Image (tube, helix red, strand yellow):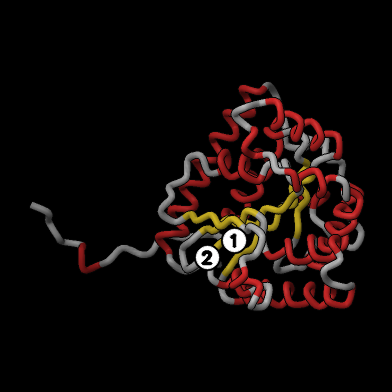
Amino acid sequence: MEAFKKYRISPKNTLKDIDPSDKPFSFGTKKDELQRLDELAVELDDLQNTLYAGKRRKVLLILQGLDTSGKDGTIRWVFSRTSPLGVHVAAFKAPSERERAHDFLWRCHAVVPANGELTVWNRSHYEDVLVPPVEGWIDKAETQRRYGHINDFERLLSETGTTIVKCMLHISNEEQRERLQDRLKDPGKNWKFAADDLSTRAKWNDYQRAYEQALQATSTPHAPWYVIPANSKRHRNLMVAQLLVQTLRDMKLRLPPPNLAFKDLVVN
């Protein structure tokens, strides 16, 4: 994972150090990159099939990012060749009244991956240490407590067979402005726009600080954060695909051994 070292959050490597316009995984022409992305998608399908057949390990991919950073698009492209059999996507919206009546991690437990599954979270429990502090709904002490709860929760998942991959899709202020404007101009994208997008954008600096603090507090050896420069959509997809494929390769997955009871079985 040496190629990702610069983009892995650590005490010496912060969100501020990473340019959202970087393209370390881009190469050649658009055609070359799309071909490479397709090759990665095919390999991911094969690796996921082995994961599913083995029914021992689990993978959780967490995608976080501000509005327009490309969480939906990343899922669409990275998993373009993957069978839906063992892949599940959970989208985290504003908590419902029932969810608010429980602790903030309650709704997460219901959608963690089971043995053999690869689960993608489109937003996640990190919304609860980003939005509430910025909006003033919780104080610094509660935010710190939640960081601790998140680290404990992710350690529990890790120690019970879940490999966690956390990606923050990092875009610039100007790139977000252009993408929001594009949603307003294009009738096919207009449905994606919400008035709340503008009120959130007005607090850009506050959200950047909230992300900076959350990533530093919750990037751990068992669940590190990777910052994905996402001003380029194609680069974003390539980098997430390469990171996920490399993670699955490193897990050394194996198909279950043949069933000896079927050795001499003949199908007529």
Is residue 47 or residue 193 the one in the foreground?
A: 193
Q: Is 128 above or below relative to 202?
A: below
User: Which label sits on residue 60?
Assistant: 1
Q: What residue type is labelled 1?
A: Leu
User: Which label sits on residue 2?
Assistant: none
Relative to residue 83, is residue 104 drawn left or right? right
Kindly state the secondary structure of the residue where label 1 is placed. strand
Can residue 45 be seen in the rendering of this structure? yes
Can residue 216 be seen in the rendering of this structure? no
- At horizontal 76% and vertical 58% (from top left) the residue drawn is 225
- At horizontal 80% and vertical 65% (from top left) the residue drawn is 132
The image quarter in which residue 158 lies: bottom right
Kindly state the secondary structure of the residue where label 2 is placed. loop
- Residue 174 at x, y = what percent? 86, 34
- Residue 84 at x, y = what percent? 43, 50
- Residue 128 at x, y = what percent? 74, 66
- At horizontal 48% and vertical 68% (from top left) the residue drawn is 114
Q: Is 59 above or below relative to 238?
A: below
Mark 2 and mark 1 in contact (Cβ < 8 Å)?
yes
Relative to residue 80, is residue 257 drawn left or right? left
- At horizontal 56% and vertical 61% (from top left) the residue drawn is 59
Q: Residues within 10 Å of mark 1 (few under 14, many from 20)?
A: many
The image quarter in which residue 62 lies: bottom right
How many numbered marks, from 0 up? 2
Which residue is farthest left? 268
Is residue 222 or residue 212 the one in the foreground?
A: 212
- Residue 101 at x, y = what percent? 64, 77
Nearer-N-terminus badge (1/2): 1
User: Which label sits on residue 113?
Assistant: 2
Kindly report the distance in space between the C-alpha atoms of the residues bearing marks 1 and 2.
7 Å
Q: How crowded is mark 2: few (under 14 residues within 10 Å), some or many (20 or more)?
A: many
